[in-house]
Image: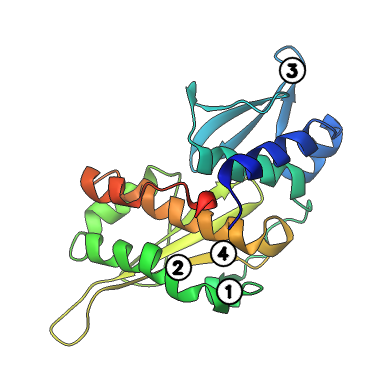
Amino acid sequence: MCNVVNAYHLAVKKFMELDHKDIELRCGTVFDKHEQAFFLDYFGRKCKISWDGMVTCDGEEVDYNDRTIIMQYLCYCSGLPPRGKWISFLDLPGGDLHHGPFQKDGTIPLAKNFDNKLKEFESAALNLGGTSISPGDAGFYVPALPKLPMAVTLWEGDEEFPARANILFDSVAPNHLSTAALWVLGIELVTKMLKGIDTKAAQEQTVDWFGK
C-alpha cells in the first residue's frame, strides 16, 4: 500500500482544487461559509475539514488513517447513494488478493475479543452510531461515512465452532473508495470497537495501515 503521508497529501492537493458545491452534492457534506469548512459524520463523530486539509472530529485532530480516508472520500466519492445490498471484502475489486490479511487484522480479532460479550459488542457498535440489524447473534448497521454505510455481525462460539464475525460494505462502496482504502476503513471499524472493551487490543490494532 502507498505511504500514508503521500496518500494524505495527494488527497489534500486534489481536494484543494475542487469546487465546494461539487463536494457537497457528491459526498453528503455541509459547507459552512462562515468557517470555510466542510462538516460530515464519520463513525458517529462530527468532523470538520478545512480547505488546508486539517481534519478534526469533535474538536480533536484525527490520526493519519482516519484523516486519509476522509480526504479520499471527499475527493473520490461518486455521489451515488447506498444500494441497500451488503457485500463482503472478498466481493470488492481485487478483494480476493487481500482477503486473508483482512481476516487476520479485522474479522478474527473482532470475533476473538467480543466472543461471549454481546452487550459489549452492542455498546461498541452503538458508540459508532450503529443501529441493530438481524444477521448473526448480533448485527449492526454502522454509518461510516454519509454515503458509505457498513455492517458488522457476530456469531458467538460454542463447543463445536469458534466465534466468527463479518464486516460488510454496501455494494456502492467501490464507487466511493478504492479497495485499499476500504481495507483500512474496515480495520479502523474494528479498532474503534475494540477501544470500548480492551485498550491493549485496540493498541495492537493501531497501525498506519496506509503506510504498510
Mark 1 or mark 4: which is in front? 1
> What is the C-alpha distance between the residues marked 2 and 1?
9 Å
Instruction: Identify which amino acid the numbered label 4 is placed on.
Output: Phe
Q: Cβ–Cβ below 8 Å for labels 2 and 1?
A: yes
Instruction: Identify which amino acid the numbered label 1 is placed on.
Output: Gly
Task: Using the rendered image of the protein, determine whether residue 99 is visible from the camera's viewpoint.
Answer: yes
Q: Residue at x 23, y 60 (%)?
A: 113
Q: Which residue is mark 3?
A: 36
Q: Residue at x 38, y 42 (%)?
A: 127
Q: Which residue is mark 4?
A: 169
Which residue is at the far left? 159
Q: Does dot 4 land on a helix, a strand or a loop?
A: strand
Q: Earlier in the sequence, mark 4 or mark 2?
A: 2
Q: Cβ–Cβ below 8 Å for labels 3 and 4?
A: no
Q: Looking at the rendering, which quadrant does residue 174 occupy?
A: bottom right
Image quadrant for the N terminus?
Answer: bottom right
Q: Cβ–Cβ below 8 Å for labels 4 and 2?
A: no
**Is 133 placed above or below 33 here?**
below
Q: Earlier in the sequence, mark 3 or mark 1?
A: 3
Q: Is residue 83 left or right of residue 119?
A: right
**Is 51 placed above or below 153 here?**
above
> What is the C-alpha distance between the residues marked 2 and 3?
37 Å
Q: Which residue is mark 1?
A: 95
Q: Earlier in the sequence, mark 1 or mark 4?
A: 1
Task: Using the rendered image of the protein, determine whether residue 58 is visible from the camera's viewpoint.
Answer: no
Q: Earlier in the sequence, mark 2 or mark 1?
A: 1
Instruction: Identify which amino acid the numbered label 2 is placed on.
Output: Phe
Instruction: Identify which amino acid the numbered label 3 is placed on.
Output: Gln
